[in-house]
Amino acid sequence: MTREIQHFINGQAISGKSSREADVFDPNTGVVQARVPLADDSEIAAAVTAAEAAFPAWSAMNPQRRARVMFRFKALLEENMDELAEMLSSEHGKVIADSKGDVLRGMEVIEFACGIPHLQKGEFTEGAGPGIDVYSMRQPLGVCVGITPFNFPAMIPMWMFGVAIACGNTFVLKPSEKDPSVPVRLAELFMEAGAPAGVLNVIHGDKQAVDGLIAHPVVKAVSFVGSSDIAQYVSISAAQNGKRVQAMAGAKNHGIIMPDADMDQVVADFLGSAFGSAGERCMALPVAVPVGKDTAEEFISRIVPEIKKLRLGVSTDTEAHYGPVVSAEHKQRIENYIDLCEQEGGKLLVDGRGFSLPGHENGFFVGPSLFDHVTPKMKSYVDEIFGPVLQIVRAESLEEAAALASNHQYGNGVALFTRSGLAAREFVSKVQVGMVGINVPIPVPVSYHTFGGWKRSAFADTNQHGPEGVRFWTKIKTVTSRWPSGTVEDQSFIIPTMG
Ligand code: NAD
C-alpha cells in the first residue's frame, strides 16, 4: 500500500481529510513512493487556530527559554542527520552528502536563532528630554506563514521558522508538495526539543492552501520562496490582504571569468556550482562569461573533458556527483530548453539529453549540457532553466560582462573570478545583483548575514535570516516615557521638539 504523508497540526500527525492528494515520487526510480494530502479550508483553519492558541504563552516566554528550545533542536538535528538526509534524498533526488548540506545550512540558521535574547534587544536613550527616556522593543507579529520550494526542503523552512519562532511568533509551514516528508520530521523534532504543541504546524497543499493561508484574517506575515511568477503573485496577494510579505524567487546567476583568474579553481568551481544538485539551486552558476577569446577557449578546453567525466548516480551513490532532477515534468522542461537553445543558435558542446542510468531507466536523470555562443537575446538565456545546463556567453570586457548580470531580469547571485582587487572592488560596487561572490562560486551568505536577491529574484522587501530576518519577523514599538516629578509643565499646543 502506498504510504500516506500526514499534516502536523497542534503537535499531532493528522491524516488529510480533503479528497485531494498528490503523488510523491522517488526520482531515482520514477516510482510513486507516497501520497501527500492537499489541505482544504478546514485543515488550513485547524493549523492557524492551533498556532493562534499557542501564541500567547510562546510569545510571553522569556527569550532565553525560547533560545534553549533552539539549542536542543540543533542537537537533535545533528543526532538525526543521517535519517533526515536519507529521507530528503529519497524525495528530492540530490545525493546524500548534498542533503546533509541542506540540513546543515538550515541548522546554521537555528544556531543564529540561539542568539535571540541578544538579537531581539531594543534600544534605549536616557534623557531624550527633561526626565524623558525613549526606548524601543521588537515584538513578535503573531501567527506567521512560510511557503517553501522543493529544492531545499530542510534549509528554507528553517530560514523561516527558525528565526520567526525564536522571535516569539507561532508558525504554519506549507512546504513543497514534491518532497514533504522532511519538513514534517523537522516539526516532530522541534516538539521533541521542547516547543509546545501548536508553535510549529505543517500543512501540505498547493495553490488552494497558499491562497487560504494568505487570506486568513489571523495570519500576520507570509514568507515565500519559489519561482518568480508565483512569488510575484504571492507578494501582491499578501499585500492586498494586509500581510507583511517577503517573496524570494527565481535566478539566473552569472560567473564572470577574467583573463587573470585561477583557471584550475574556476573549472572546479563551475563543475560544482553549475551541475551540483543537478543545477536545481537558486544560487547555481548556469551562465559562464569568459572575458576575451583566449579566456573562453581555455575555459572550454579545460571544462569539456571534466564535464564528460561527471558521474550521475542514484542519490545513495556516494561516488555520484549528482542525482536525478525532481520530477518527470522537470526533466522534460530542461530537455525542452536544451532543444530551444540549440534552435536559437547556441553551439551545443556537451549534450545531456536522453541520458539513461542503467538499472534506473525510469529515473528522472538529465546529463550535463554545455552551450557556447549563447547571446542575451535568446529566450533560453533569459529564462531560468534550473537544470544541469551551463551556457557560455562571451564578453570582450569586464564592463560588458558585468552589464549582462546587471541587465538580466534576475539578480540573485553573481560571481567574479579574478586576481585583481581593483577590478573586484569596482565590480562589487556597481553590479545590480543582491549577492556577490569574489572567487566564490555560490555566494550564499552565512546565517548571521542575510540572504536575498534583487529584481525578479525577490519581491516585497526584507531578506531572509540575519538581522534582516529578525526585522521581518518582529514589529517595533517605540516608547517615550516620563515619570511624575511633582512639577507640572505649562500646557503646550505646539508639537514637542527637543530644541
Ligand atoms: P514553485 O514556485 O513551483 O513552488 C513554490 C511553492 O509555491 C510551493 O510550496 C508550491 O506548492 C507553491 N505553489 C505552486 N503553485 C502555486 C500557485 N499557483 N499559487 C500559489 N502557490 C503555489 O517553486 P519550486 O519549483 O518548488 O522551486 C524552484 C524555484 O524556487 C526556482 O525558481 C528557484 O530559483 C526558486 N528558489 C529561489 C530561492 C531564492 O531564495 N531566491 C531559493 C530556492 C528556490
Image (cartoon, rainbow, N blue to C red):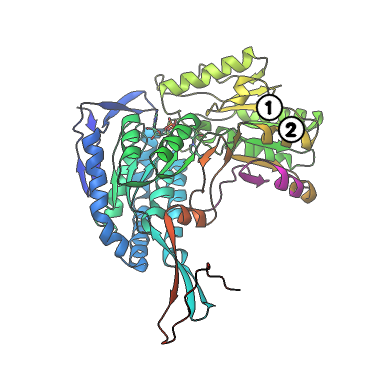
The structure residue drawn at horizontal position 75% and vertical position 44%, both measured from the top left corner, is: 418
Q: Residues within 10 Å of mark 1 (few under 14, many from 20)?
A: many
Contact? badges 2 and 1 (CB < 8 Å): yes
Secondary structure state at the residue bearing disc 2: strand
Does the rendering let one see residue 231? yes
Residue 91 locus on image (x, y percent): 36, 33
Q: From the top left corner, tell me how far across and down residue 238 is, in percent.
A: 41, 39
Of 209 and 274, the residue lying toward us? 209
Among numbered discs 2 and 1, the one appearing first in the sequence: 2
What residue type is disc 2 on? Pro
Residue 307 image position (x, y, % from top left): 61, 28
Q: Quadrant of ligand 1?
A: top left
Disc 2 from disc 1: Cα separation: 8 Å
Image quarter for residue 453?
A: top right
Q: Quadrant of the N terminus?
A: top left
Asked whether residue 437 is drawn in magenta, I would say yes
- The residues colored magenta run 425-446
SS class, disc 1 = strand
Count of picture labels: 2
Residue drawn at x 48%, y 72% is: 134
Please tell me whether residue 229 belongs to the stretch shown in magenta.
no
Give the residue number, with chain letter if any, for mark 2. Answer: 290
* Residue on which disc 1 sits: 392
